[in-house]
Amino acid sequence: MLQKLEEVKKEFDASIDAVGSMPDMAQFKADYLGKKGKLNALMGGMRDLSDDDKKNFGARANEVKQEMLDAIDRRSQAIEIDAINEKLAENRMDISWTNKISDLGQQAAGLHPLTSVTRELEDIFLSMGFDILDGPHIEDEYHNFEALNIPESHPARDMQDTFWFKDGEHLLRTHTSNIQIRGMEVKKPPFKFVGPGKVFRCETLDASHEAAFHQLEGMMVGEDISVPHMIHFLRTLLSEIFKAEIKVRLRPGFFPFVEPGFELDYECMLCGGKGCSVCKQVGWVEALGCGMVHPNVLRSGGIDPDKWNGFAFGMGIDRLTMMRYHIDDVRHLHSGNLQFSEQFRAY
Ligand code: DAH
C-alpha cells in the first residue's frame, strides 16, 4: 500500500508540469484528490491494514495530500502568470500612438518647411519696415513681361519657359516680379515691400528644378538709393536669414527690369562648397537676382525716374529651404509625402 502511494505520488510529480490551463488543472486535481481520485481509492484499502500500518499509511497519505495541494497551488499560480504575460504580449500598448495618424485620421498639425521659411523671411522684412504684398498666380502679359521692360520681341521672354493660357494673353507667372508692378499700382514712393509666392516654369525636372517653385520679390524705392545701399542691405538680409556668417559673391547679371543687374551667390551649405547635386557641383548657390530698378519699370508704375530710384531683388525660397533643413532634392518639397513632411512637425 505504501509503495503504491509512493508510485501515485511519483506519477503526480512527473505529470503536474504538463498541465497548461486552469480547467485542465481542475481535472488534474480531481484525478488525484477528488472523491473518486487516486488518493481516495488507496485510502479505501486502509481498512484491511493492521493498526500500525494504518497509522503509518494514514500519516504518509496526509503528507502526500498536503504536498500535492501545495504543488497544485504553485503550478496554478504559474499558469495564471503565463496567461497574463500572454495577454500583455498580444495587446501591447502602443505608446507612440499620438505620433501616428490615428484611426480617425487626426494628427498634430505642423508647418511645411517652405511655409516656415517664408514666414521667417516675412518676419525679417517686417522688422525692417517692409510691407508684404501679394500678386496673382494667373497673370497677364503686361504685368509679367511688358511693364517689366520685357517687350514682346525681347529675347528675355524666351529665357523663362512660360505656361501660356490658350487666349495667348494670360499665363502662369514666371516670377514674382509681377508684384513689383502690382505694388507700384497701389503705393506712392517712398516705399519698400516684399511679395512671396509660387511661380511656374515649363522646366525639365531634376534634383534642383521644379515646374512650380517659390520666390520672394523685394522692391525699395526712395531718393538717392545706390548700389552700395543695395549690397549692404542684401548682406544684412542674408546674415539674418542664415543666422551665421556665410560667404557671398556678386556677379554681373542681366535682367531687363534692372540696370545695372547682379546675381548674388552664397557658398553651398549642404556640401560646404565642395560640390553636390543641389549646387550642381559648383559649390555656390544662386541666392537672388538684384539690381537698380530700370527707369522704364518706374515709368510703368507711374513713378518719375528723375526724382525716384531704388533697387529690386528676387530670391528663390525652395533652395533656401533645402539649405536650411539639409534637403537634397527639391522634389521632396512638393511630394505630398507625409513621411517627409512629418519630419518638420516641430518647426
Ligand atoms: N525675376 C527674376 C527671375 O525670376 C529674378 C530677379 C532678378 C528679380 C533681378 C528681381 C531682380 O527683382 O532685380 O529670375
Image (tube, rainbow, N blue to C red):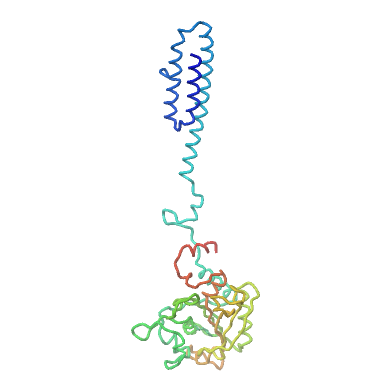
Percent x, y of residue 175: 47, 81
| Residue that appears at 43% across and 12% down | 44
Percent x, y of residue 118: 53, 72
- Quarter of the image where one finds residue 125: bottom right
- Quarter of the image where one finds residue 269: bottom right
- Quarter of the image where one finds residue 321: bottom right
Percent x, y of residue 276: 56, 75
Between 289 and 132, the residue placed more toward the observer is: 289
Q: Which residue lies most toward the left here?
A: 166
| Residue that appears at 37% across and 86% down | 169
**174 on left or right of 116:** left
Q: Is residue 4 above or below residue 225?
A: above
Q: Which residue lies most toward the right here?
A: 245
Q: Is residue 40 above or below residue 112?
A: above
State the quadrant of the C terminus: bottom right
| Residue that appears at 42% across and 29% down | 24
Q: Which residue lies most toward the top here?
A: 51
Percent x, y of residue 239: 63, 75
Between 347 and 196, the residue placed more toward the observer is: 347
Q: How many marks?
A: 0
